[in-house]
Image (tube, helix red, strand yellow):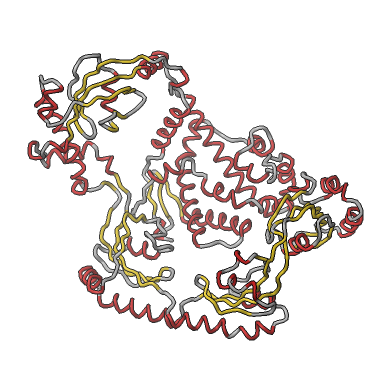
């Protein structure tokens, strides 16, 4: 149990690592598609490069990760469940791809390596979040070793460690393969010298830029065959996943005025009993929708409704109902007293042994000089024990109630003993801030929520709309007539759980992937809204049709043709003549360097920078086709600036990372069919 508790306290930080270590998952997210193949075998949830993923295996992994989460975190929300499912899918796809890669490369991770990652000289970063001292941040190998030695005594600890171990192995395999790729990068001396030469030169240039927009489209022509030819040559640029577009309207379910009034009355009806309650705090805890622990606050810290009456209020008086945010409240002044804003204290925690706690208390109540020494030796709060039990300054309400009251109500220098949920505390109050008047109000709240009646009224309204407007034409006409707000969900993937601002809209997603074009949906209840949608676009997995990218391709061809047209027009002319021809001016730019991609007056133009860097002084260039326009330039002079080798990025970490990323992108560019939508 102790071994599991070590992980339980910090598992929240590590949950993502267990599920989402996906070896550059950002690449996988961009590159792995969602297929819609219809499999003849009903237990196949997807394929990776033709290799099947069985729904049973996927479900088993989901259940394992859900169990891990519940053991370490407790309640599993729907959002977290969706994240777990998506993370498991990405990991299973990733494993299918890289298992073969690692095997061919001969890369393995041994048990000794895993142990070294936990207790040796190569501690895994993710484990530092588990076994580091929370006060110092220093990794404690002894704690990690103790956990590993004792984990077999607790089946749950074994289960947790197995999940961690899988993540560690995946991480180490990824790091090894990344290192293998990075070490393969080599730049020759000639390449490095050429790079250094280019970077050491800065140019002052005169140039004329002719924007493509100044050349009428009518002067060049683009045929359909040219568009199709370029599309076919660059077809991979238009590869797309299976997606859907919808348009939809919502009918929000919001509390009515009647709901508001009923909530206010319900709170008001508790006022008499609240006034007569002997233990106001306990009564509030039992009856509040959002119970709050007792807390002493200054007037300026109170809600505005209470701040205005606090100074003149009598203890036992009940105020309200008053509105605060989405809730109605009544508050009873339990007490008011002079209390400091903060206290400086130290403590010793004894979790269970009452006799030891009594002995230590009897010693320290007579002599506090040994407090720090005893705290280091006996305190079971390891975070503060290393500092002699010192907790430094803390504000009113920061600590658990019993501890807090002991510190803020006893005198400076006092040694007191109190018991809390954590054990027995021996506290030495070292210093106290300046006292000020503070108020302790017990509060009962009730949030204004919509009633069953309100829910039914909105449902009837939404259902009436759905039943009358059963096709896209009627749907859009009714929206205009009723002045409703149309919303859009574009490029929805089959794995999506949310659509635009609609959260937990999985049922709408599933409908969209089974509906026909222009079909109007049934009525969905999504959170606190009723939703009606129409399917406006079906994009199958494959390539965007040429008709949808024709404008982009046309612009590329126009840029090419306009550049050629400009070159023909300016042949044999000087910069001044070219400027006069196009009603512009000769610009100048200083310190143009190969290391940069921009030219003052032209903007980001890498092709222009490259041509300038390799040009000869005083020679007018040919036309350079840029992104935004065509350019003609002449280098007036080059300045040589000695360049330190350290500024040259050859063999740099950035280049190695870029190469590794490219290698990964090639590896993961496989055919992936994601058919989870059939099952979930």
Image coordinates of residue 566 in percent, x first then y, are: 12, 29
Position in image of residue 579 (x %, y %): 14, 27
Quadrant of residue 233 in the image? top left
Residue that protrudes farthest toward the left in the picture: 219
- Residue 335, given in percent of the width and then of the height, sits at 71, 73
Up/down of 115 relative to 418, above or below: above
Residue pictured at 62% horizontal, 71% vertical: 291
Taking the spot 33% from the left edge, 79% from the top edge, the residue there is 461
Spot the residue most to the front: 312
> What residue sits 20% from the left and 15% below the top?
619
State which quarter of the image contains the C terminus.
Answer: bottom left
User: Is residue 468 visible in this depiction of the protein?
Assistant: yes
* Res 614 quadrant in image: top left
* Image side of residue 366 versus residue 485, left or right: right
Along the line of sight, which residue is nearer the eye, 255 or 319? Answer: 319
Q: On the image, which quarter does residue 281 sit in?
A: bottom right
Which is more toward the observer, 154 or 370? 370
Quarter of the N terminus within the rendering = bottom right
Q: Is residue 251 above or below residue 10?
A: below
Q: Is residue 349 visible?
A: no
**Which residue is drawn at the image coordinates 37% and 70% (left, top)?**
524
Left or right of 448 on screen, residue 676: left
């Amino acid at each position: 149990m102790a071994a599991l508790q070590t992980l339980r306290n910090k598992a929240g930080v590590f949950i993502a690592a267990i599920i989402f270590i996906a070896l550059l998952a950002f690449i996988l997210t961009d590159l792995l598609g969602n297929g819609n193949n219809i499999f003849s075998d009903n237990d196949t949830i997807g394929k990776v490069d033709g290799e099947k993923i069985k729904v049973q295996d996927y479900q088993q992994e989901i259940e394992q990760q859900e169990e891990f989460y519940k053991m370490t975190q407790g309640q599993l929300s729907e959002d977290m469940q969706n994240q777990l499912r998506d993370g498991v899918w990405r990991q299973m796809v990733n494993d299918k791809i890289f298992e073969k890669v690692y095997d061919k490369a001969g890369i393995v991770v041994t048990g000794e390596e895993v142990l070294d990652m936990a207790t040796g000289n190569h501690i895994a970063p993710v484990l530092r979040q588990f076994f580091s001292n929370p006060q110092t941040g220093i990794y404690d190998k002894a704690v990690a070793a103790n956990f590993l030695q004792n984990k077999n005594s607790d089946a749950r600890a074994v289960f947790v460690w197995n999940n961690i171990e899988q993540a560690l192995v995946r991480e180490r395999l990824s790091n090894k393969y990344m290192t293998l790729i990075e070490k393969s990068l080599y730049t020759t001396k000639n390449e490095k010298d050429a790079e250094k030469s280019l970077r050491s030169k800065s140019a002052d240039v005169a140039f004329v830029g002719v924007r493509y927009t100044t050349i009428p489209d009518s002067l060049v022509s683009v045929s359909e065959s040219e568009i199709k030819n370029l599309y076919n040559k660059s077809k991979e640029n238009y590869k797309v996943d299976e997606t859907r577009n919808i348009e939809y309207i919502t009918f929000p379910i919001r509390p009515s005025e009647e709901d508001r009034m009923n909530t206010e009355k319900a709170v008001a009806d508790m006022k008499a009993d609240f006034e007569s309650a002997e233990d106001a705090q306990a009564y509030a805890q039992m009856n509040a929708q959002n119970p709050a622990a007792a807390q002493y606050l200054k007037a300026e810290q109170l809600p505005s409704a209470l701040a205005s009456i606090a100074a003149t209020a009598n203890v036992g008086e009940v105020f309200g109902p008053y509105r605060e945010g989405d809730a109605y409240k009544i508050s009873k002044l339990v007490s008011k007293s002079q209390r400091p804003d903060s206290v400086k204290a130290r403590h010793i925690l004894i979790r269970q042994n009452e006799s030891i706690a009594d002995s230590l208390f009897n010693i320290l109540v007579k002599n506090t000089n040994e407090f720090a020494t005893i705290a280091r030796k006996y305190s079971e709060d390891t975070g503060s024990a290393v500092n002699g039990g010192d907790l430094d300054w803390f504000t009113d309400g920061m600590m658990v109630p019993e501890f807090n009251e002991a510190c803020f109500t006893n005198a400076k220098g006092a040694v007191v003993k109190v018991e809390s949920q954590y054990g027995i505390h021996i506290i030495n109050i070292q210093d106290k801030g300046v006292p000020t008047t503070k108020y302790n109000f017990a509060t009962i709240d009730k949030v204004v929520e919509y009633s069953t009646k309100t829910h039914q009224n909105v449902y009837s309204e939404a259902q009436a709309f759905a039943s009358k407007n059963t096709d896209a034409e009627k749907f859009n006409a009714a929206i205009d007539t009723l002045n409703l707000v149309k919303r859009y969900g574009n490029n929805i993937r089959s794995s999506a759980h949310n659509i635009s601002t609609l959260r937990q809209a999985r049922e709408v997603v599933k409908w969209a992937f089974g509906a026909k074009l222009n079909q109007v949906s049934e009525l969905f209840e999504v959170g606190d809204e009723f939703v009606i949608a129409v399917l406006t676009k079906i994009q199958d997995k494959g390539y965007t049709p040429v008709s949808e990218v024709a404008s982009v391709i046309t612009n590329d061809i126009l840029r090419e043709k306009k550049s050629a047209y400009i070159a023909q027009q300016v042949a044999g002319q000087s910069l001044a003549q070219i400027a006069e021809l196009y009603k512009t001016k000769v610009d100048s730019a200083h310190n143009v360097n190969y290391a940069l991609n921009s030219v003052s007056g032209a903007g980001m133009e890498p092709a222009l920078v490259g041509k300038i860097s390799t040009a000869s002084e005083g020679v007018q260039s040919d036309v350079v086709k840029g992104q935004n326009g065509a350019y003609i330039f002449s280098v007036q002079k080059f300045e040589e600036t000695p360049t330190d080798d350290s500024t040259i990025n050859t063999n740099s970490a950035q280049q190695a990372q870029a190469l590794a990323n490219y290698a990964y992108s090639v590896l993961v560019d496989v055919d992936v069919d994601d058919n989870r939508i059939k099952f979930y």
